[in-house]
Amino acid sequence: MQTTLSPGSVASRAPSLPEKHAVKLTINGAVHHLELAPWTTLLDALREYVNLTGTKKGCDHGQCGACTVLVDGKRINSCLTLAVMKDGSDVTTIEGLAGENGLHPLQTAFIEHDAYQCGYCTPGQICSAVGLMQEGRAKTADDIRELMSGNICRCGAYPHIVDAIQEVMQLDPNA
Amino acid sequence: MNSFSYARPSDISMAVGELATHEGAKFIAGGTNLLDLMKENVERPNRLVDINRLTLNTIDDTEDGGLRLGALVTNADTAYHPAVESRYPLLSRAILAGASAQLRNMATNGGNLFQRTRCYYFYDLATPCNKREPGSGCGAVHGYNRIHAILGTSDQQPETTCIATHPSDLCVALSALDAVVRVTGPNGDRTIPFADFHRLPGDEPWLDHTVQPGELVTAIDLPAKGFSDYNTYIKIRDRQSYAFALVSVAVGLEIENNRITDARIALGGVAHKPWRKPEIEAMLVGQNLSEADFQSVAEALLAGAKGYGHNTFKIELAKRAIVRALKQAANLEPAS
């Protein structure tokens, strides 16, 4: 037996969707005006609405760090913040790190040190390392390991990642 | 995530008004725990009130020589603040022992107090949980309970059983420091001594704390006494970084002429709230360092502890961690 519902009866019972919000984000230097539902995470806004897919969705729960971006200069998990909460902010993703003179030094160092295998965590690793260097708290290789612990690499490229960061920080490799 | 509406009030009274007029609304600050739980359908607010634009983001000296931590200062900015590093290094250490650098850049001091338990059964909608669904039972008490509580649990009635722990590191330090939480709400301002902020599960395991619906934490006050000369925070966990505590110990001591004049010991990972027993801490006062009986203090603090199988190891682990923390805080052993 077929049941036919008139469109009107469905619409009258459907919960009304909350309004979308105007969100202004400056992403890698370019201003974007977006209209987003409140539950859109910053990660989904970047990937689905601005087509910047360099930032990866790994666990979507803040446990893996693949979604790490810089917001107003600070590294955060873009999966655990709503885009609307960051209205007016300045966002830097992996796509925004290279400059006129080529790759960011950390990108070059990751290539030279073979600091990845599959590469899925790499954008998050590099953005996290940029944040770490700006914070200026890491003095030793142990500090780097501790302060990069929010970025998981399931290929296990950790020793090369630490080497790459250490080189760019111009630390003593034996520290 | 479920559908919800969003508001971004620009002052505190508007924020409090939002919650007073919208049943089912919740405040959001850093969002690191709330959004995670919303993705899991454990938390289902119908409206989020974003308090990030409120001016609760400074750290200031108080008149009585203490420090006021704004509710919206991030964990990272708090841990690395010069006044916290120099006057309350115990707090700094505890914060840096928790989460990851990214999460500490997002999570706020106020939000940290409202962290929910990391009990697997609380997160798993397919299992009973008295905290998530009052009266439904407890999946942990006869389940896999390695990370669960050994002190102050509720296990006599199925409908109120709860052996969840409070997951915060920051709160263990705040407990040791006798912090005071400042809140505002529909009925005005009030302060809550830290010991009264979180609660044991008792007959209402669904309640984590004593803040009333609609109240907003505005600041956390640290008293002048910071135990900056003799303190430690030891956190024992399955992974050396970025893991929740199996057992953690915050110790602050005051020592004059080789004699202990004040002592604070707070335990994390063992109960529904940071665990303190001031009457047992008092056992240390007056003791000479060379003869201090740390083992008896550890035994007394764990009196009445109860294991549930997978977590029974925590009882001995906590005792050893307490002894080690006391020795390290007193500079009798190098910091680990």
Image (cartoon, rainbow, N blue to C red):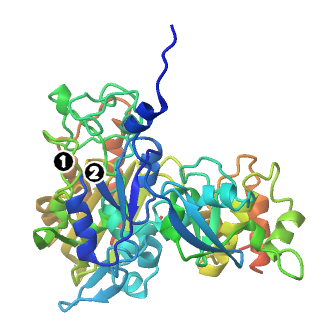
Q: Quadrant of residue B321?
A: bottom left
- x, y percentage for residue B53? 40, 77
- Left or right, B315 with respect to B93, comes to left
Tell us which disc is closer to us: 2 or 1.
2
| Dot 2 and dot 1 within a common chain | yes
For label 2, the SS is loop
Point 18% across, 74% down: residue:
B262
Instruction: Give above or below for B46 relative to B312.
Output: below
In the image, residue B21 lies at what x, y percent? 21, 60
Q: Is residue A88 above or below residue A147?
A: below
The residue where tag 1 is placed is B200
Q: Amino acid at mark 2?
A: Gly
Q: Nearer the viewer, residue B72 or B196?
A: B72
Residue that appears at 18% across and 37% down = B154
Q: Chain of mark 2?
A: B
- On the rendered image, what quadrant is the C terminus of chain A found in? bottom right
Q: Residues within 10 Å of mark 2 (few under 14, many from 20)?
A: some
- In the image, what residue occupies the spot 18% across and 52% down? B199
The quadrant holding residue B152 is top left
Element under label 1?
A: loop
Residue B42 is situated, as x and y percent measured from the top left of the image, at 38, 41
Q: What residue would you read off at disc 2?
A: B24
The amino acid type, in three-letter code, at marker 1 is Leu
Residue B176 visible here: no
Q: Is residue A48 visible?
A: yes
* C-alpha separation, residue under disc 2 versus residue under disc 1: 24 Å
Classify mark 1: residues with Cα within 10 Å, few (<14), some (14-19) or many (20+). many
Of pointers 2 and 1, the one earlier in the residue sequence: 2
